[in-house]
Amino acid sequence: MTQHAPDWSQIEDVLLDMDGTLLDRHFDNFFFEEELPRRYATLHAISFEEARDRLMSMYRSVEGQLAWADLHYWTKQVGIDVVAMHKELDHMIGFLPGAEEFLRHLRKLGKRVTIVTNAHETGVSIKVAKTGLDRYVDRIVDAFEVGALKMRPEYWPNCQRLLGFDPSCSLFMDDDEGCLIAAKEFGVAYLVHSAKSSSRLPPSTLPQFLSITEFSPLMNGRPTG
């Protein structure tokens, strides 16, 4: 299906996810699916496979809740300093290809740009320190400030009250289908799916949204799909 870039003349606010949209999700995937299970296995003298199964079950048990994104919660749950691990591995944190150019493009267009992320503020601060992401945007809002994760229906009215954006003149971009659906149901007019969330994984498109594997279609108006 051929899809076209949004009409930027109709857009005032740009709401952007962080991990998997601007920053390479490979860091998060590696951290929670590979390195943390490896260290958990060593701590408990169990196999990597058993450790990963246990952790995946723990992740699923709080999916959709703020605890899912709370680094301090996970430090207590697994008995490993998850925040210190983030700092230790921060060399793996980086932008997806074209993300910085896209952010500079939005600045030239004069849009108000806000990062809306499910990440915990501690994780956000580590990633901002590594990437300088904050210099490109007007504000960064984490889910704990809003009081819910983005896939929850209560997130969007809370976020609107906090930021004062008009959904009919706003664009939201995310790599998570549930977050995009929740934004659509709230009435956000322009929705973009980040189909290439990790540099190490193949793209995964969503036919119901403008689904892009690179930022250039949003900047030059080329059709995609």
Image (spheres, rainbow, N blue to C red):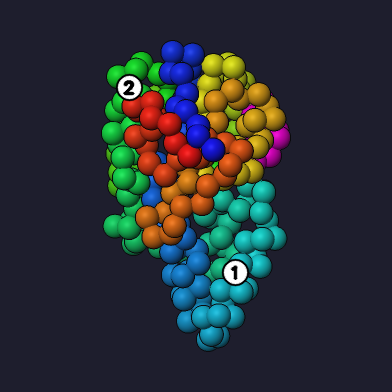
Q: Nearer the viewer, mark 2 or mark 1?
A: 2
Q: Residue placed at 51% from the left, 25% from the top?
A: 171
- Provide residue 179's location: percent of width, then percent of height: 61, 40
Say which mark, if any, is on residue 91.
none
Give the CA separation, mark 2 to mark 1: 40 Å
User: Compared to 48, does 183 lie above or below?
Assistant: above
The answer to whether 28 appears left or right of 165 in the picture is: left
Q: Is residue 25 magenta?
A: no
Residue marked by disc 1: 55
The kind of residue tagged 1 is Leu
**Residue 105 visible (yes or no):** yes
Start-end of magenta stretch: 151-157
Q: Is residue 203 above or below residue 58?
A: above
Q: Earlier in the sequence, mark 2 or mark 1?
A: 1
Q: Position of residue 71 (x, y in %)?
A: 52, 54
The image's mark for residue 107 is 2
Q: Are marks 2 and 1 in contact (CB under 8 Å)?
A: no
Residue 91: name its quadrant. bottom left
Residue 195 at what x, y percent from top left?
Answer: 48, 46
| Mark 1, secondary structure of its residue | helix
129 or 51, which lies in front?
A: 51
Query: Does 162 appear above or below 101?
Result: above
- For the image, the number of numbered tags is 2
**32 over 203 or under it: above or below:** below
Q: Residue at x 34, y 39 (%)?
A: 99
**Image spot of residue 22 (x, y percent):** 40, 41
